[in-house]
Image (tube, rainbow, N blue to C red):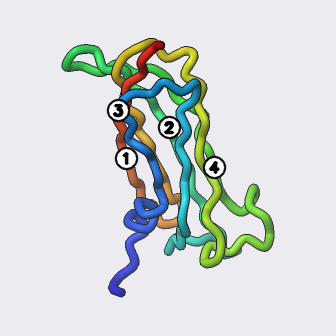
Amino acid sequence: EGAYDPGRAIARQLDVREPRRLRQTCLRVRHLNELSLAGLDPAGKPNIVMEYEFHKKEGEAEKFFNKTNPQAINASNLPPQFDPAKFPVPGGISVPLASFGEGQYRLSVKIIDKVSGKVLTRDVNFTVKTS
């Protein structure tokens, strides 16, 4: 299969929908599929941090809007029986849209593999419309 690339493995597991217009009350970002990182700690667990930043588009420019607290996934919060070859890495967020005004936004998802040092960033554009 070739050389292992942690960035590609992370990208395969990142499931971010790209909605054109959101009328729901929450934005959900889920992480699915298996993630078998080359960067496993001595206990055989991944050690990653997920960061989510929201930017509001204002004409041709963007302005930082909000961010969530970083989400750490490592041996301290994974069950002892967790095996990255058998189980998907848990994670994801649900963000209430009540504070988002109508407009266009960009969600930047950053995944940091603290063992291998690899960083992956994915952007998703979405529009919030009021009813």
**What residue would you read off at disc 3?**
20
Residue at the image point whose x is 46% and y is 32% from the top: 53
The disc, 4 or 1, on the residue closer to the chain's N-terminal end is: 4
**What residue would you read off at disc 1?**
122
Q: Disc 3 on helix, strand or loop? A: loop
Check disc 3 and give the amino acid type: Arg
The disc, 2 or 4, on the residue closer to the chain's N-terminal end is: 2
**What residue would you read off at disc 2?**
52
**Closer mark to the observer between disc 4 and disc 1:** 1
User: In which image quadrant can residue 89 be found?
Assistant: bottom right
**What residue would you read off at disc 4?**
72
- CB under 8 Å between discs 2 and 3: no
Check disc 1 and give the amino acid type: Arg
Check disc 2 and give the amino acid type: Tyr
Measure the C-alpha gap from mark 3 to mark 4.
Answer: 29 Å
Mark 1 surroundings: few (<14), some (14-19) or many (≥20) residues within 10 A: few
The disc, 1 or 3, on the residue closer to the chain's N-terminal end is: 3
**Closer mark to the observer between disc 2 and disc 3:** 3
Q: Which numbered marker is on residue 114?
A: none
Check disc 4 and give the amino acid type: Ala
The disc, 2 or 1, on the residue closer to the chain's N-terminal end is: 2
Residue at the image point whose x is 39% and y is 28% from the top: 21
Measure the C-alpha gap from mark 2 to mark 3.
Answer: 19 Å
The image shows residue 56, relative to residue 49, as above or below, that is: above
Mark 2 surroundings: few (<14), some (14-19) or many (≥20) residues within 10 A: many
Specify whether 74 is left or right of 127.
Answer: right
